[in-house]
Image (spheres, helix red, strand yellow):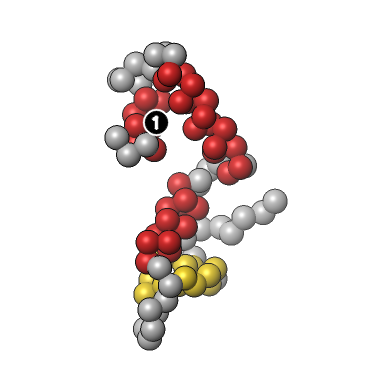
């Protein structure tokens, strides 16, 4: 599957309450909620470099399992990534 290239961005439309989601090359979508637009942009840009974004939930669950078994040292990047994902 081929994905849209480039960083995704959001901007408020000149008129109305909608937010556009776009790259430098193309318009992607519009949404009424700024929070939803930001979440879409963050999710897409956060998957940069991941060939199969559908694997992200599996990777997250694997990190949680490692942490539940106390295998992750708080100084490891994996632990830092997990706590960042969980908003801790």
Tell me residue 51's x, y (percent).
61, 42
Using the image, determine if residue 68 lies above or below residue 83.
Answer: above
Q: Is residue 38 visible?
A: yes
Residue at (38%, 86%) from the top-left corner? 15
Q: Quadrant of the C terminus?
A: top left
Using the image, determine if residue 21 lies above or below residue 85.
Answer: below
With 29 as the anchor, is 12 left or right in this view?
A: left
Q: Is residue 24 visible?
A: no
With 72 as the anchor, is 26 left or right in this view?
A: right
Q: Which residue is mark 1?
A: 82
Residue at (38%, 84%) from the top-left corner? 16
Tell me residue 19's x, y (percent).
41, 72
Residue at (57%, 32%) from the top-left corner? 58
Tell me residue 28's x, y (percent).
54, 68
With 1 as the anchor, is 13 left or right in this view?
A: left
Q: How many marks?
A: 1
Tell me residue 64's x, y (percent).
46, 26
Disc 1 packing (10 Å; few <14; some 14–19; many ≥20):
some
Give the residue at the far right of this rendering: 1
Give the residue at the far bottom of this rendering: 15
């Amino acid at each position: 599957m081929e994905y849209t290239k480039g960083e995704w961005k959001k901007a408020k439309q000149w008129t109305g309450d909608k937010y556009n989601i776009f790259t430098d090359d193309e318009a992607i979508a519009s949404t009424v909620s700024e929070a939803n637009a930001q979440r879409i942009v963050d999710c897409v840009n956060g998957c940069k470099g991941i060939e199969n974004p559908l694997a992200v939930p599996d990777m997250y669950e694997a990190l949680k399992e490692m942490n539940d078994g106390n295998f992750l040292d708080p100084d490891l990047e994996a632990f830092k990534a997990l706590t960042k994902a969980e908003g801790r």
